[in-house]
Image (spheres, rainbow, N blue to C red):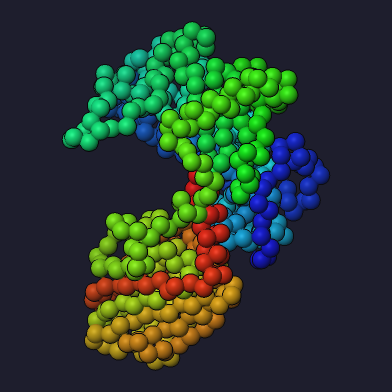
Amino acid sequence: MSSHPAPSSPPRNPGVEAWDDLPEVQRRLAARLQEAFAAFLEHTDAQLGRLVDALERMELLDDTVIVLLSDNGASQEGGPFGVLHEMKFFNFLLETPEEAVEHLEEIGGPRSHANYPWGWAQAGNTPFKWYKQNTHEGGVHVPCIVHWPRGITDGGAVRQQFHYVTDIAPTIYELVGVEPPESYRGVPQLPVTGTSMASTFDAANAAEATRHSVQYFEMMGHRAMYVDGWKAVTRHQAGTSFDDDRWELYDLTVDPSECHDLAGEQPDRLAALVARWWEEAEAHGVLPLDDRTVELFGARFADHTPHRPDRRYRYRPPMSYLPAQVSPAIGGRSWDLVASVELAAGQGGVLFALGNGNAGLSLFVQDERLVFDYNAFGDHTVVESTGPVPTGASALGVRFRREGTGARATLTIDGDAVGEAPIPFAMRVVSSVGSSVGHDQRLAVSERYEGPFPFEGALEVVEIQLVAPAADEAGDVAAAEERTAMGRQ
């Protein structure tokens, strides 16, 4: 596992290396990663088929409107080579092909969290430019399929009219005859900004049916403006002045892949589109421009949120699984965990688990010992108490303290240290999988047990307190949260 950070930006599409010029190890890894992607897409397609078949059996298919589309362009989080475990990207770990190729057979299985490399992302976006997160066509232009036998007579036909994701709701409203209320229970509602696509169902000619003629785009400082087939677009470098962004101009009616930049030939049209972007941005609450991500998408400690201002989490089981976004924000931080329990002789089980068998951490009781397993992408650091856990009531915990790029974990029973070990690498982002209290619901974090390994004693409460970070630790956490937030877009 390399500790070198991955490059912050993928190359432009024309600079991708030819497949035959890549080393064999890179081709083997890239091919397997794309095979896994294709297999999961096939699996998704099969599940859609099950839904359609069920609707048909219930004689509901003809009256059901199905809208299917991709959420954005192809992902760029796989880096230049692709990754066996995407969370390594978010921890600034560049997994080399030589390392990953040793685990080819794991790709697509329960112990992989794979992502294809930039080359396949570019192929997936063909013929469009750039990726997910950008406002060039590679980030925002996706197929949309509408199926409605009762209302669409021209089944299987292709439409080229411009529409945007905000148009889906107005389309459904029109089809079912619903007028969105201006207020709901006395609360004024934001206006519906989209335009119905229903007019395209029976109109093959784009000029006859195009209603959505104006659309602004903004994503983390990347911006674009579409008006009647013309598009102005700029790719922003985070931290630089928005005034320094270079705007490009394209006529999408003849150049949908944005190959021929007309900014130099038609500066007046470009200036008008850029000016229109500022008008639309102001009207729709985009301003002031902000290219931050961590402050906007990371854990925000505030009242009435899962992340309290005092950075304290308290859980009283039985509890359902907690998604990652609402789980304790302990990645890259120092923290204390204490579980108040009552045990009889021979009882054990998981007190708290975060993540899964790919990466995570788990505190549990096994064979009358308190155990902490820190699983950093398959590298397990296991700490076991030097003595048995007492029967009856006790407070079982772990203190986790960052030390440079690593950490130190100390087990505690009723506040007394009962075992400790250094953690070679402290994950800034632990997992996209959330947490469980009183059991390990997902693929077991630890190899010491099989999930869910529920706690057999009485577990009254689990409390986690984040410890105020040092300046360098805070910076590491911010950078990592920024990367994982970008990955969720």
Residue 223 location, quadrant? top right
Q: Classify residue 477 as left or right of residue 247.
A: left
84 or 430: which is nearer to us?
A: 430
Q: Is residue 427 above or below residue 10?
A: below
In this view, the residue farthest toward the bottom is 387
Can you give x and y, in whole percent of width and height, for residue 25 in the image? 74, 54
Q: Classify residue 59 as left or right of residue 68.
A: left
452 or 322: which is nearer to us?
A: 322
In this view, the residue farthest toward the left is 185
203 or 402: which is nearer to us?
A: 402
Residue 439 location, quadrant? bottom left
Res 69 seen here: no
Identify the residue at image location x=75%, y=41%: 16
Identify the residue at image location x=46%, y=32%: 282
Can you give x and y, in whole percent of width and height, for residue 456 in the image? 27, 75
In this view, the residue farthest toward the right is 21
Res 176 seen here: yes
The quarter of the rendered structure image containing the N terminus is bottom right
Residue 455 location, quadrant? bottom left
Identify the residue at image location x=52%, y=83%: 421
**Badge count:** 0
Can you give x and y, in whole percent of width and height, for residue 414 in the image? 32, 87
Q: Is residue 262 above or below residue 289?
A: above
Identify the residue at image location x=26%, y=88%: 391
Can you give x and y, in whole percent of width and height, for residue 445 in the image? 45, 67
Q: Is residue 325 above or below residue 452?
A: above
